[in-house]
Image (cartoon, grey):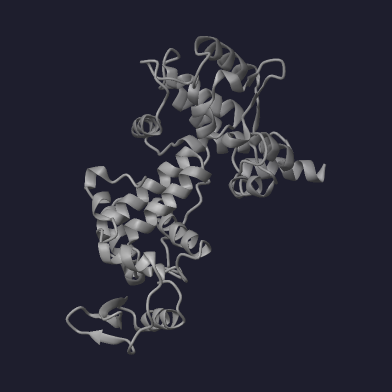
Amino acid sequence: MFSLNDLRIASKCRKTPFVRKIVSKRRSVPMRKPYFKKSHKAWYVDLGGKPHRLGKDKEAAFQEYHRLMSGEMPATPQLTVCQLFDQFLNWTQRNRAPRTLDWYQAHLSSFAAYVGPKLRIGDVKPYHVDKWLDKCYPNSGENHRNGACRAIARAFNWAVKQKKISENPIKGMERPAYEPSEDFLSPEQWAELIALVKPEDPFHDYVSLLWETGARPQEARILAAKHFDRPGRRLVFERANSKGKKERRVIRLNPTALAIVERLALKYPDGPIFRNRRGEPWKPFALNNRFARLSKKLGYKVYPYMLRHGFCTRALVRGVDPLTVATLMGHKSAAMVMKVYSHLAQDDQYLEEKLRQATG
């Protein structure tokens, strides 16, 4: 499950015969207290006539020792990082969406490759994550680095809940600050952007749907003809493909969006309807590249979520109440939408107009 074929790590992460032996049966009670081996820079205890490694941290080593004294099975800090990640990804594959699995696998495989196949859970420290970020994510933004940290922490927290380990080894670690993406595209900027995309370009349909409906980029990318409710002039996604997976996501279509979906649903009755010039479904990487090239031409950064935020801002400026806007955008409450007011609070023209309305 833990695909590290390119790095040749998965094959090295199997348990040694000794580990298989001690996991398969209960151990005898240790004959003496833990002792520190300077040559290995780790704590050990004699178990069944053989030295058993407890780890480098003294406190954790004595906790493990007391568990062994009580006759319990060995604590899983003896697992390697790679072995634990393998178990977590197997669980994720059974219980989460494929794209969630892909996200975790990308970060976890990178971390496992960096620390190597022999690092045990009991020896993991926050500085391992810090050094990994510096080496493997040197040019990434803070949000991407924050996400990488969250992926590692999530795997360890899962192991704690499953009673595989007693504590997350990087608990309390300070992560890179997350900066919410609240930029939005103004109508003037939208006009500049769409002027750079030819009408016959399939990318034109994709960005137009985002602008006209406020759909999430991922929702538009996986949109298929089966989601199109023509009589209701709307798109209805299964719960499995809806954010939160508790309620079906519904996207209302205005005339422009309706015409786009009708045309593409007839052209592609099976699979995603937004496709590139070769007739293949858009990949996230390809879409990000298109926005990166547009950013260079425009002279300012644009990315998919700016179109969704632009929809929200336009609706608020035109007097649609926040709760209705939230419903149209697929939020459960207006809390997320209210953040957009931070943009409007800096718009002098908007505030002057609202002042005139307020004072009659």
Residue shown at 50% from the left, 38% from the top? 305
Q: What is the x, y in percent for residue 146?
A: 42, 56
In the image shown, does 26 or 101 lie closer to the viewer? 26
Q: Is residue 153 above or below residue 43?
A: above
Q: Position of residue 77 (x, y in %)?
A: 38, 69
Residue 295, image x, y percentages: 38, 34
Looking at the image, can residue 85 be seen?
yes
**Residue drawn 47% across the image and 71% down it:** 166
Label count reads: 0
Nearer the observer, 122 or 150? 122
Q: With 211 as the anchor, is 327 left or right in this view?
A: right
Q: Quadrant of residue 236?
A: top right
Single out the residue that lies furthest toward the bottom: 32
Q: Is residue 188 above or below residue 128?
A: above
Q: Nearer the viewer, residue 99 or 337?
A: 99
Q: Against 205, is 53 above or below?
A: below
Give residue 301's quadrant in the image: top left
Residue that extends furthest to the left in the rendered view of this protein: 39
Residue appearing at x 25%, y 43% in the figure: 5
In the image, taking residue 339 as reference, residue 282 lies left or right, namely: left
Q: Quadrant of the N terminus?
A: top left
Residue at 36 percent across and 52 percent down: it is 108
Viewer can see residue 137? no
Q: Nearer the viewer, residue 109 or 266?
A: 109
Dividing the image into 4 quarters, which one contains the C terminus?
A: top right
Residue lying furthest right: 360
- Expressed as whole percent of the image width and height from the top left, the position of residue 105 reads 38, 47
